């Protein structure tokens, strides 16, 4: 990848990660994505729950949807404690291990997630759940119950083409979506929908409503996935930053939340990557779910193009800019082709 290609994503990530979009409160990022997609699409709509749907090409005939969720994890204030600190309820899967001392924004007001001074530290100080979290804003009387709490913006380019910032999951996917819109060449055989979805971090139902509205023949999801390239994760798998996008086969979380990639669609992506000498990785993940699970309810063939990340759901997450570029190129090549035969039960 050239330096200029890498730099396309760096400012995009910096800009997108600073826009608020807590699950259920996505209006700011919805507006930002809609405005940027409107510069390239034939039509852009925002539905009643905040999904952004951009259409490229005339409706009718074969169609494919590419989706990236716009929402983020965070907290909502649910009490002002007697000591003046704020108590919160989590929205989405918060990484409690990484929280102490993290800077946050409480409805735009600066705050800090409380942490005991090291001089007073105890062995059991690690945060275990939401009841352990308190937020210091200095002026608690200025905060309303149900105020949103988000990680403060703090991004940096790291050596080796990596980028660190809050909410790479899934502002990295949003950046890929915007780059696709900018570089996309119309395919007369395919209507393309680029969709920014809401509420993935809480229920995944935003994608369900968007897909039900456009009724594509297949759906491709661009989302953050876990890497296994740190000392504490190396025994869990082989995905690494810089190894290319991840063509995931299987996701599962407890309680029957599971998803399987369509074999023919995933095979199609692998073939295109091989033809164009694009690096890719593969994985099957226990402990992760995505918007893709909604396609089971709709009977849609689907695949995930995962963007490897370190520190998922921590206040700072790390991605590799090369992986975002490779994902973009893979999807552009895919969108220049007709869809493969996606019927099941073929020998």
Image: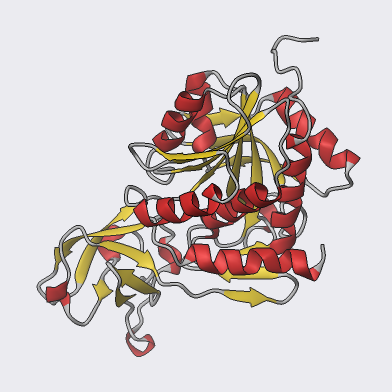
Front residue of this view, candidates 273 and 174: 174
> Is 41 on the left or on the right of 48, as rendered?
right
Seen at 49% across and 75% down, the residue is 154
For residue 105, what is the image quadrant?
A: bottom left
Return the x and y of residue 13 as percentages of the image width and height. Answer: 57, 64
State whether residue 201 appears in this view: yes
Front residue of this view, candidates 294 and 328: 328
Seen at 66% across and 21% down, the residue is 62
Q: Name the image quarter holding the C terminus.
A: top right
Specify the farthest residue to the left. 82
Seen at 60% across and 47% down, the residue is 40
> Is 116 on the left or on the right of 308, as rendered?
left
Return the x and y of residue 261 as percentages of the image width and height. Answer: 64, 29
State whether residue 230 appears in this view: no
Q: Name the image quarter holding the N terminus.
A: bottom right
For residue 320, what is the image quadrant?
A: bottom right
Decide: is 82 above or below 29: below
For residue 268, what is the image quadrant?
A: top right
């Amino acid at each position: 990848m050239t330096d200029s290609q890498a730099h396309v994503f760096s400012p995009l990530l910096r800009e997108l990660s600073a826009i608020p979009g807590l699950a259920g409160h996505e209006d700011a990022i919805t507006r930002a994505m809609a405005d940027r997609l409107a510069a390239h699409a034939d039509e852009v709509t925002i539905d009643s729950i905040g999904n952004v749907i951009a259409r490229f090409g005339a409706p009718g005939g074969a169609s494919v949807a590419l989706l990236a969720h716009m929402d983020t994890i965070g907290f909502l204030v649910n009490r002002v404690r007697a000591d003046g600190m704020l108590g919160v309820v989590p929205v989405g899967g918060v990484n409690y291990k990484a929280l102490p001392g993290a800077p946050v924004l409480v409805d735009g007001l600066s705050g800090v997630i409380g942490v005991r001074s090291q001089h007073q530290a105890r062995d059991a100080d690690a945060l275990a759940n939401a009841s352990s979290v308190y937020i210091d804003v200095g002026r608690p009387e200025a905060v309303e119950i149900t105020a949103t709490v988000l990680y403060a913006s703090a991004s940096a380019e790291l050596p080796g083409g990596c980028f660190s910032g809050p909410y790479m999951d899934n502002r990295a996917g949003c950046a890929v979506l915007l780059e696709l819109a900018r570089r996309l060449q119309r395919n007369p055989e395919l209507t393309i929908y680029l969709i920014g979805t809401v509420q993935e971090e809480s229920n995944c139902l935003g994608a369900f409503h968007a897909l039900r509205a456009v009724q594509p023949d297949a759906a491709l999801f661009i989302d953050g996935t876990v890497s296994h390239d740190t000392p504490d994760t190396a025994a869990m798998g082989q995905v690494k930053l810089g190894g290319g996008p991840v063509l995931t086969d299987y996701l599962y979380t407890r309680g029957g939340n599971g998803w399987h990639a369509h074999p023919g669609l995933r095979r199609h992506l692998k073939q295109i990557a091989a033809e164009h000498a694009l690096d890719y990785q593969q994985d099957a993940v226990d402990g992760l779910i995505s918007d893709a699970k909604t396609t089971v309810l709709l009977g849609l063939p689907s695949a995930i193009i995962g963007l490897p990340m370190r520190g998922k759901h921590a206040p700072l997450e790390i991605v590799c800019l090369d992986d975002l570029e490779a994902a973009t190129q893979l999807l552009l090549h895919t969108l220049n082709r007709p869809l493969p035969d996606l019927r099941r039960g073929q020998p």
